[in-house]
Image: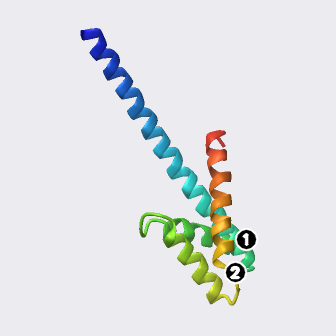
């Protein structure tokens, strides 16, 4: 009976460790996605290299305003509008999804 409990406890700890690792990887992937989204948006807005890096960091910070992607979407969409660019909601959301996949693949590959 004792060995069954030890096995169960070990399995539970392994699941908890995997969950924590998965959460950490997802956090890193979302931050990477947001940085890539910021660089994409900066390029569309014609920002200089230095300004693009600063803008990408601002997009990453915007994600901490609320759970989910809406805060990031609002920032980028608002900045496009303010700079006079007409970029559709669908194009921005597609880019968010595309970059999320790329970021997750990179994190899984250990990049």
Q: Residues within 10 Å of mark 2 (few under 14, many from 20)?
A: some
- Against 96, is 10 above or below? above
Q: Position of residue 49 (x, y in %)?
A: 73, 71
Where's residue 40, x and y in %? 70, 69
Q: Quadrant of residue 81?
A: bottom right
> If you read the primary sequence from the N terminus, does the residue marked by circle 2 or circle 1 appear first?
1
Between 77 and 52, the one lying in front of the other is 77
> Which element is circle 1 on?
helix
Residue at image x 44%, y 65%? 64
**Can you give x and y, in whole percent of width and height, for residue 86 in the image?**
70, 85
Distance (Cα) linking label 2 and label 1: 21 Å
Secondary element type, mark 2: loop
What residue sits right under mark 2 in the picture? 87
3 relative position to 97: left or right: left
Residue 38 shown left or right of residue 72 in the figure: right
Question: Residue 100 location, x and y as percent?
Answer: 62, 56
Q: Nearer the viewer, residue 88 or 82?
A: 88
Q: Give the label on residue 93, or none.
A: none
| Position of residue 44 in the picture relative to residue 21 (left or right) | right
Determine which residue is flagged by label 1.
Answer: 49
């Amino acid at each position: 009976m004792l060995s069954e409990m030890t096995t169960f406890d070990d399995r539970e700890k392994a699941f908890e460790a995997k969950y924590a690792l998965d959460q950490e990887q997802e956090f890193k992937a979302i931050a990477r996605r947001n940085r890539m989204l910021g660089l994409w948006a900066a390029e569309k807005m014609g920002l200089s290299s230095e300004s693009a890096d600063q803008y990408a960091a601002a997009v990453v910070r915007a994600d901490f305003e609320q759970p989910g992607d809406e805060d990031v979407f609002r920032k980028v969409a608002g900045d496009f509008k303010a700079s006079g660019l007409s970029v559709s909601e669908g194009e921005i959301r597609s880019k968010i999804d595309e970059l999320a996949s790329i970021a997750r693949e990179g994190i899984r590959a250990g990049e």
